[in-house]
Amino acid sequence: MSRASVVCRAALGATLLASGAAAQGAPSVTLEGCQSLSEAAFRKHLSLELSTLGLERALPALELHCDRGFVTIAVQLANAKRYPVAARVDLGDTARGARERLAALAASELVARAVRATEAEAEPHAAESKPESAPAARVDLTPPKPARPARFELSASGTAVALGAPRATLWGAALGSRIGLGSRWSLLLDTRFERGDDALSLAKVRWSSLSGLLGVASRLRAGPLELSAGLGARVGWLSLSATAAPPYQGQSMTAPWAGVAVPLRASFALGGSVKPFVGAEAGYVTLPVRGNVGDGERLVEHSGAWLSASLGAAIEL
């Protein structure tokens, strides 16, 4: 075997031994549900932070659990008995490229806490020979409880709806509530009053509608933005009042109506419990209302599809 071959083999062996040592001397990192975090970038920033704090040999085991823009970090030291230490970090408003650095900074601070507490426990207690001395202080290691999703919500909004044949535009207001049915589902309730005029060749018709919605909705959160889509039934009472020029005479009528509704909403968490939102609702009338002239010809009709928009604010209780 040539001398060059021996040198190459020795260099390769040294490289493999160094790689194995680095793997054995690297912190253990476990990520759960953290698709928005790069493990490689997190390890790089963590190594830099631990080096800055002089904790290269701490060799912690870290577990990161991500949920709705928050990451819970738990740190376990190999020689510690009363750990892990845990903390919860909000990544929702952090730029995507800086999330790994923020998580690594929080993790390095937890490692420093754990190391200091472990070293304090390892020191001889000066009070062992003095039974009456005060006990050593203990660090509270209870992880923070995750934020509880809102159970109840009230909202108020202005509304506009296009409905009927011929098409009429009504304006009004709505009061609504959402009752939580878990982390994603909610029960929807609302009450609306809307009014508008429709100028026709034979008469001017005033529409007045009072309705209520009962349904369910599923929501999806992406940082401060929350999207919601639902399905429900809208039932109401419609008043049609016709005003005609002589020699014609206008009349009024009221009747119930009902339909299937698909409510949509996008709300924005700006801090605190108040959330502004924009909404839309598409629906189809299953119990129509018809207003006829004296000879039986249709004048107006509340049937077919309707489409509404809303703008308002909600408060979480």
Image (cartoon, grey):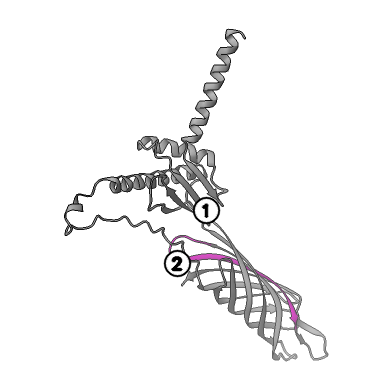
Relative height, residue 109 to residue 12 (above, below): below
Kind of element beneath mark 1? strand
Foreground residue among 259 and 119: 119
Foreground residue among 7 and 237: 7
Task: Judge left or right: residue 202 versus residue 78.
Answer: right
User: The N terminus lies in which quarter of the figure?
Assistant: top right
Q: Is residue 277 magenta?
A: yes
Q: Amino acid at mark 2?
A: Ser
Foreground residue among 223 and 237: 223
Residue 37 visible (yes or no): yes
Task: Judge left or right: residue 114 versus residue 35.
Answer: left
Kind of element beneath mark 2? loop
Residue 302 visible (yes or no): no
Q: Identify the residue at image location x=63%, y=78%.
A: 213
Dot 2 crowding, Cα within 10 Å, few <14, some 14–19, many 20+:
few
Task: Judge left or right: residue 237 versus residue 247.
Answer: left
Label 1 – label 2 distance at C-alpha: 23 Å
The location of residue 196, given as percent across then percent down, is: 64, 78
Residue 260 marker: none
The location of residue 75, given as percent across then percent down, is: 43, 48
View extreme (front): residue:
129
Residue 66 marker: 1
* Start-end of magenta stretch: 268-288
Residue 273 marker: 2
The location of residue 15, given as percent across then percent down, is: 53, 23
Foreground residue among 185 and 106: 106
Mark 1 or 2, which is nearer the eye? 1
The location of residue 308, given as percent across then percent down, is: 65, 71
